[in-house]
Image (cartoon, grey):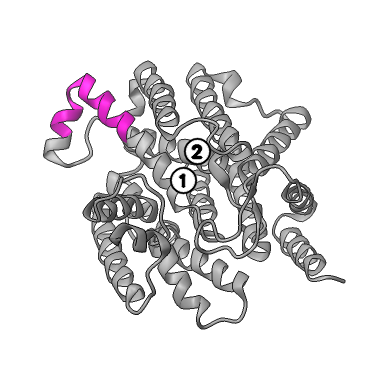
């Protein structure tokens, strides 16, 4: 039995304990997709992975969700939201378009320029918020922002910029095994506990199975399809949850602290270095933590997976624990203090893990 066979067996065992035969079936589907020659990512492209991996993780999650929801529709009384409500149809259509936009990039890199992708996301997401302005919160508890949200056109512009920015943040954070999938799993667990919708349970299932697969094998990245698709769902849920008062802006900030902080810090760092804010590099916090773990662990996959899991569980996972144990109500603005603590922790760990770390190629070029 090869090492890969052992990984597949281990993944099937964990999935069967977690979700039974449905979990095993999803693992086998992901194993098949991960072997495709299409959508391969070069080793170390993200500065963490040391083996060639597949970018079709988003497609794998999409197929698992479609098959599961199809089964629920055929063999139960469940009726998909896209059939029941016009708003649901618009929302999931936008999610599908974003997923396809990312999948095109996964299959054929640079099929569209970054500027074109950005404009398309702005048009699609802006169109959704224009048609359904109830997705945009009327206030979040910050005076200047609340004043701008009271002006419909400004509210639409702010909502669209946030929506597009968050999807890019989610995509930027996809590098370490279990990082973005871990955050997504926690988010859908909270949404399922809060709303009890079957679709949220299916998304939690798909993300959990992907998390198991990603952590043990390291054969998948979410890719642009996964980060665009999941990012558009989570951001949409978050905006609507804050708009309806079920979640506070502070709660969502704490829940999604890592991708948001990573985007702000990365863009600021590049601007200070005189580089384009959208230029890629391997100096994110997850790159720095991985560098420290890699020097202390013999297993490269373990160092990669521990990086992603530790960050996702220390940020979003902490919020899930607080939510389940009712430390604070989900609509409390006091979650903002948790976000502030996360921000301070991010800065401290970023500084400490960068000490003694050799310059990456991107940094060297920037300073040349």
Measured along the vertical axis of the image, is residue 342 above or below residue 59? Answer: below
Residue in the foreground of this view, choosing between 27 and 319: 27
Q: For residue 367, which quarter of the picture?
A: bottom left
Residue in the foreground of this view, choosing between 224 and 366: 366
The residue at which mark 1 appears reads as 171
Instruction: State how far apart marks 2 and 1 are (Cα).
Output: 7 Å
Q: Please name the residue shown 57% across and 25% down the image.
A: 81
Measured along the vertical axis of the image, is residue 230 above or below residue 319? Answer: above
**In x, y percent, where is residue 250?**
28, 49
Q: Residues within 10 Å of mark 1 (few under 14, many from 20)?
A: many
Look at the magenta stretch and give its main secondary structure. helix
The magenta-colored residue range is: 146-161
Point out the image quarter for the N terminus. bottom right
Task: Please state the total of marks drawn on the protein image.
Answer: 2
Measured along the vertical axis of the image, is residue 123 above or below residue 249? Answer: above
* Secondary element at tag 2: helix
**In x, y percent, where is residue 6?**
80, 69
Q: Please name the residue shown 39% across and 46% down the image.
A: 169
Residue 228 on the magenta segment? no
Which numbered disc, 2 or 1, marks the residue that appears first in the sequence?
Answer: 1
The residue at which mark 2 appears reads as 228
Q: Is residue 314 visible?
A: no
- In the image, taking residue 256 as reference, residue 60 lies left or right, namely right
Q: Residues within 10 Å of mark 2 (few under 14, many from 20)?
A: many
Q: Residue furthest front?
A: 368
**In x, y percent, where is residue 217?**
68, 63
- In the image, taking residue 34 as reference, residue 90 lies left or right, namely left
């Amino acid at each position: 039995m090869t090492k890969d066979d052992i990984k597949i067996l281990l993944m099937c065992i964990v999935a069967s304990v977690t979700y039974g035969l449905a979990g095993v079936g999803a693992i086998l589907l992901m194993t098949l997709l991960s072997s495709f020659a299409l959508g391969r990512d070069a080793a170390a492209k993200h500065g963490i992975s040391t083996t060639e991996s597949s970018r079709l993780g988003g497609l794998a999650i999409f197929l698992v969700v479609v098959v599961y929801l199809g089964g629920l529709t055929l063999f139960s009384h469940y009726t998909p939201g896209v059939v029941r409500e016009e708003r649901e149809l618009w929302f999931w259509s936008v999610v599908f378009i974003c997923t396809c936009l990312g999948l095109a990039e996964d299959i054929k890199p640079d099929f569209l320029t970054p500027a074109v992708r950005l404009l398309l996301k702005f048009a699609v997401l802006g169109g959704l918020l224009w048609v359904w302005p109830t997705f945009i919160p009327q206030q979040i508890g910050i005076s200047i922002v609340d004043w701008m949200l009271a002006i419909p056109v400004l509210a639409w512009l702010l909502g669209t910029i946030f929506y597009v920015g968050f999807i890019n943040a989610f995509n930027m954070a996809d590098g370490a095994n279990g990082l973005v999938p871990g955050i997504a799993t926690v988010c859908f667990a909270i949404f399922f506990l809060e709303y009890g919708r079957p679709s949220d349970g299916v998304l939690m299932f798909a993300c959990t199975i992907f998390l198991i697969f990603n952590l043990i094998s390291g054969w998948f990245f979410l890719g642009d399809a996964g980060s665009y698709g999941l990012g558009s769902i989570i951001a949409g849920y978050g905006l609507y949850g804050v708009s309806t008062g079920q979640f506070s802006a502070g709660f969502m900030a704490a829940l999604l602290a890592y991708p948001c902080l990573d985007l702000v810090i990365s863009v600021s760092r590049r601007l200070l270095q005189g580089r384009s804010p959208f230029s890629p590099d391997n100096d994110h916090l997850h790159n720095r933590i991985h560098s420290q773990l890699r020097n202390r662990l013999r297993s490269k996959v373990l160092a990669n997976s521990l990086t992603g899991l530790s960050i996702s569980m220390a940020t979003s996972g902490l919020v899930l624990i607080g939510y389940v144990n009712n430390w604070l109500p989900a609509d409390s603005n006091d979650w903002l203090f948790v976000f502030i603590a996360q921000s301070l922790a991010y800065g401290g760990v970023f500084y400490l893990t960068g000490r003694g770390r050799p310059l990456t190629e991107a940094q060297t070029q920037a300073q040349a």
